[in-house]
Every structure is written in C-alpha cells, then in structure tokens.
Amino acid sequence: MEKKSIYYYNYFDLNEYIMIITSKTDNLKYVEEYVDDFSTFHKIDKDLYGNLLIAALEATNNAMTHGNKLEENKKVELVFAIDGNKILLTVRDEGLGFNYQDLPDPTTPKNIENMSGRGIFLMKKLSDTIVFENNGSLVKMTFLMKNDKI
C-alpha cells in the first residue's frame, strides 16, 4: 500500500485553506495546483498569482529540503487565508529551524553563481511582509490584494 503523501483540510473554506504534505519534492506539483485553485476561486490577478505561487513553492521547497531534510515521514503545512485585502501564507516544517538573520546575499558577486540561496531572497521580494518564527521553521508571508478583488 502506497503511503499517503498529501492531506487536505478545510479545502475551499471561504477564508482558510490548509494543506499538509509529506517532504517529497514530487509534492510541489500539488502546491502549484493548490495555489491555482485558491487564486481562481478568489479571482487573484495574474501578477499577485505569480508572486504567491513562487513564494509558496520556494517556502515549501525550503521546508522540505532544509527543514525536514527530505525525510518523507515529516510533513509541511501550508495555510492560505484571506483577511480583508490581504492573503496570508504560512508554511511550517518539522525541522529545528535556521539562522534566518544571517543569510548570504545571493546578489553579491561571490554568490551570484551559486545554485542555491535565492529562495528566501525571492520570498522577501515577492511578499509584502515576511516573518520567521520558531527558529525559522515557520514562515508567515502577507500579500496585499487590490481592493476591487475583495
């Protein structure tokens, strides 16, 4: 029997969507589908959709790879919520966290050719606010929607 790798809770609740997946990079496709469904349902404009999608994928990939060390028995939880004109995205892993205040700048000449190290940089650039909690094993991002989309 194949082990379940994706779990949905409150799927299509009007204000909150919760998705729990195992730490298997193949599950990133489900995150993309989830963002697609959320964005379609809430009529999110294409620019905000792109920001939300890339930030969600980066945060989930980081949680799986760095937080949970790709241990498939460990889960990643994503919560999408609507609060007025804001989309709140929370991603939590089961890892020990990391020093999110001491990250190399991926745009400097010595780091520009590195194959990794851009995820958090992108998340910071694409979201309107970003906060790390629980030693970095929980990230909260806020994305502002246009008032006419509410």
Image (spheres, rainbow, N blue to C red):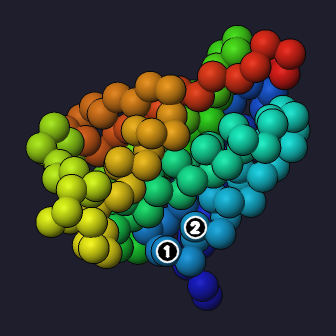
Q: Residue 139 at what x, y percent from top left?
A: 38, 38
Amino acid bearing label 2: Leu
Task: Give the left or right position of residue 125, taking residue 33 as reference.
Answer: left
Q: Relative to 51, does residue 118 appear above or below in the rendering? A: below
Q: Are marks 2 and 1 in contact (CB under 8 Å)?
A: yes
Q: Position of residue 90 (x, y in %)?
A: 49, 36
Q: Which residue appears farthest toward the front when viewing the image?
A: 109
Front residue of 114/19: it is: 114
Which amino acid does the dot numbered 1 rest on? Thr
Residue at figure coordinates x 35%, y 49% from the top left: 120
Residue with the mark numbered 2: 28
Disc 2 crowd, CA 10 A, few/some/many (<14, 14-19, 20+): some
How dense is the environment of label 1, judged by Cα within 10 Å: few (below 14), some, or many (20 and up)? some
Residue name at image x 35 percent, y 58 percent: 118
Q: Does 50 sit above or below residue 113? A: above
- Residue displayed at 21% across by 56% down: 108
Q: Where is mark 1, residue-wise? A: 25
- Give the x, y percent position of residue 2: 60, 85
Query: In the image as oriented, which residue stretches furthest toward the bottom?
Result: 1
Q: Secondary structure at mark 1?
A: helix
Residue 52, image quadrant: top right
State the quadrant of the N terminus: bottom right
Tell me which corner region of the image, top left, top right, bottom left or bottom right, holds residue 3: bottom right
Measured as percent of width and height from the top left, residue 36 is found at 78, 52
For marks 2 and 1, give the CA distance.
6 Å
Task: Name above or below for residue 143 compared with residue 97.
Answer: above
125 displayed left or right of 41? left
Nearer to me, 68 or 58 = 58
Residue 71 seen from this side: no
Of 81 and 121, the residue lying toward us: 121
**Location of residue 138 with respect to 68 vertically, above or below:** above
